[in-house]
Image (cartoon, coloured by chain):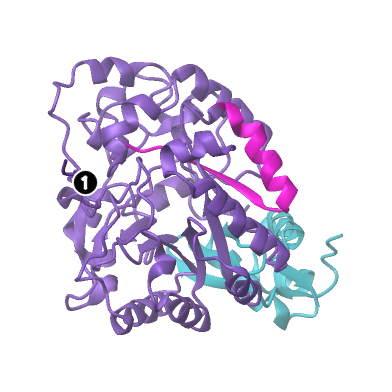
Chain colours: A purple, B cyan
Amino acid sequence: MPSDHPRLIDQLKGGLDAPICLTWELTYGCNLACVHCLSSSGRRDPNELSTAEAKAVIDELRDLQVFYVNIGGGEPTIRSDFYELIDYSVAQGVGVKFSTNGSTINPARAARLAGSDYVDVQISIDGADEATNDAVRGVGSFAMARRAMDHLATAGFGPFKISVVVTRQNVAQLDAFADLADGYGAQLRLTRLRPSGRGADVWHELHPTNEQQVDLYRWLLDRPDVLTGDSFFHLSALGESLPGLNLCGAGRVVCLIDPVGDVYACPFVLHSEFKAGQVRDPGGFTRVWRQSPLFLSLREPTSAGACASCGSYDACQGGCMAAKFFTGLPLDGPDPECVKGYGEAALAGVAAGSAPSPGIGHSSPVTFRRR
Amino acid sequence: MFDSSTAYRLDPKVALRPEPFGALAYHYGSRRLTFLRSKLLADVVADLGDYESVDSALDQRVPAGQHRAYRQALASLATSEFICAV
């Protein structure tokens, strides 16, 4: 392809006028309590954006020519204005992809969704069978997701997405997930487990072993049609690059708007250190994206730091910022799941309790039964 | 099959967003994103429908030495349906 510039990746590192891909969590409320929830969701926040405020954000996204927005939560569909907001977004030319646990997708809603052009639906499951899934997402959640998939298929929605966070427990089920998706004419989407939100508490037990990562890498290379959100670029250090953008896009090509309107560098760093601004402030989202000191600093050239002497740095780019941050590793060193083993060695040097805490966020309070 | 002696235009389901490196192109039908990696390529793609053929667009807009590379780039955009035959 003709190019004025030698390396696209360097252009992208320097940031764009608007994000390519923006995640927007509409609510912290959720009827599930997944053990790895990256936003520690459970209870709604009284300060969540109103319908009018949410529409003002959509107006900005339209003006910035953001092609589509990834809506999540919490469980976004529990907002009473959910369908009003996605209809408004589509009418403004901003396509919608939303993630759901499926609980509210009944036959009528499935038919409504099947009738809209620019809406994609992602149903989350984290196991190819009930036992594996429900251990992570809660009792009854597998049946709930399957019902939603059945309703979408019956309504003729077309290729919806089945979204899976890869864990030590489900990595052996990749073929089963692919079969499930094929059976529905759906698309499989796999993403990486991050130690973010409540995920920090379970990451050490649930993240794939290095051997499993090698299997996953080979599996993905054989199936370029499986969507990944480009989240496994740290595996590219194993050899041939995986398809997609091999870089950390935080604050450069992606960011997150949380339910109360705070803007973070990516969906996996809900922490004050990565908060860039607030959409309710003067200048709105556009000003945050273009002028926040945090985002400007993330677009500066970075040093390879401790990874400088590793021959694979060009391939993996040092991995995921969020994974490093929440495991207590320096940001200019190896990813905790570095396939060359440098992450494991570095983790051994992190003092217990010294990693930054994601806090309890909006997790539902634990209730103790009185005797 | 891509034939540069015939007319093509930007697919109506594709949106272009100017960027410092050229443009981002997004296909609302296939949900695919692609990078148009120069300003000139982005301009040619945007206006392609105004010309009676791809060759005529190249003759008028693109330095001769780059025609081959541009034909390849446009052929790949035709395969992924970012541009379509008129």
Tally the marks: 1
Q: Identify whether B33 is placed above or below A280.
A: above
Image location of residue A313, percent across then percent down = 39, 27
Comparing A195 with A303, the one in front is A195
Quarter-of-image position of residue A359? top left
Q: Identify whether B12 is placed above or below A268.
A: below
Image location of residue A300, percent across then percent down = 26, 48
Q: Which residues are magenta?
A: A172-195
Q: Residue at x 30, y 60 (%)?
A: A28
* Image quarter hosting the C terminus of chain A: top left
User: Is residue A1 on the magenta stretch?
Assistant: no
Determine the secondary structure under disc 1: loop
Quick one: which residue is furthest to the front in this view?
A: A371
Q: Identify whether A133 is placed above or below A108.
A: above
Q: Is residue A54 visible?
A: yes
Image location of residue A133, percent across then percent down = 50, 39
Comparing A283 with A29, the one in front is A29
Q: Is residue A303 visible?
A: no
Comparing A242 with A114, the one in front is A114
Which chain's residue wears label 1? A
Q: Residue at x 47, y 77 (%)?
A: A83
Image location of residue A87, percent across then percent down = 50, 80
- Kind of residue at badge 1: Val
Q: Residue at x 49, y 67 (%)?
A: A68
Q: Residue at x 65, y 50 (%)?
A: A187
Is residue B79 toward the left or the right of residue A93 in the image? right
Quarter-of-image position of residue A23? bottom left
Residue highlighted by disc 1: A366
User: Is residue A178 on the magenta stretch?
Assistant: yes
